[in-house]
Amino acid sequence: MTTRVLIIFGSTYGYTEQYATWLAEDLRALPQAPEVETVPASKVTPEQAEAFDAFVIAGSDYGGFLNGAPALRKKILPIIAPKKNRTAFFTVSFTGEYSKKLLDKAVAKSYTPELTEGRPVYHLRGGIDFDKISLAHKTALKGPVRAWLMANPHPNEGIQQMLECYKTGKAEYIDRETLKPLVEDIAKFL
């Protein structure tokens, strides 16, 4: 019997959706050849989720809030909970793994510790284009970066890239290769 995998994503500027599309392609190419569908978190229904055996939940991070998480928590997580052992998570943010501790907390808070504990969680890098992001996101980005710089005169690579991005107006760090460990983890429960 073919395993059915549903990738549910919350994407604001397209990076998380791109990773979800690549992940679906990579999973279909596995020897197990699961049936894979992608759906935005805003459009997934409980009936749709019921029909799947395994799940990948993806959210874009903006200041510790994962896009799509509130809607999923109410209507979809109760359906996924019994299938917890066949569930994985990933976030997409500008800093990716540089913010691992903060993003791990955001995933647990957004999707409940009971569901996320012991499950694969990955943090991938997206990008930013100041011409496309909302005023709210621009404002949210400036405060944390300034506060961090005041507390840490030696920024890590992620913060340094963010500072450079303020000068250039955009940066993109999306990388399909970073999905490989996630694909390997998902393959274990197919």
Image (cartoon, grey):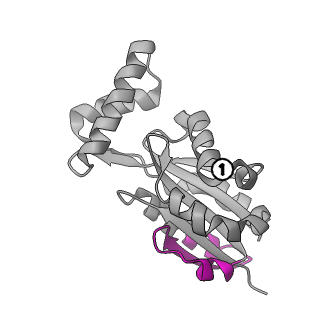
With 150 as the anchor, is 71 left or right in this view? right
* Residue at the spot 41% in from the left edge and 28% down from the top edge: 159
164 is higher (above) or lower (below) than 8: above
* Residue at the spot 48% in from the left edge and 60% down from the top edge: 68
Instruction: Decide if residue 153 is in sight here.
Output: no
169 is higher (above) or lower (below) than 179: above
x, y (%) of residue 144? 39, 28
Q: Classify 10 Å Cα crowding around label 1: few (below 14), some (14-19), many (20 and above).
A: many
Q: Is 44 part of what is drawn in magenta?
A: yes
x, y (%) of residue 163? 32, 28
* Residue at the spot 74% in from the left edge and 84% down from the top edge: 2
With 138 as the anchor, is 118 left or right in this view? right
140 is higher (above) or lower (below) than 65: above
Instruction: Decide if residue 84 is in sight here.
Output: yes
Viewer-closest of 15 and 116: 116
Seen as rendered, the residue at the extreme left is: 131
Q: Where's the C terminus, which quadrant? A: bottom right
The residue under label 1 is 121
x, y (%) of residue 96? 51, 42
Q: How many marks?
A: 1
Q: Secondary structure at mark 1?
A: strand
Extent of the magenta region = 24-52
Q: Say what amino acid the circle numbered 1 marks.
A: Val
x, y (%) of residue 66? 50, 51
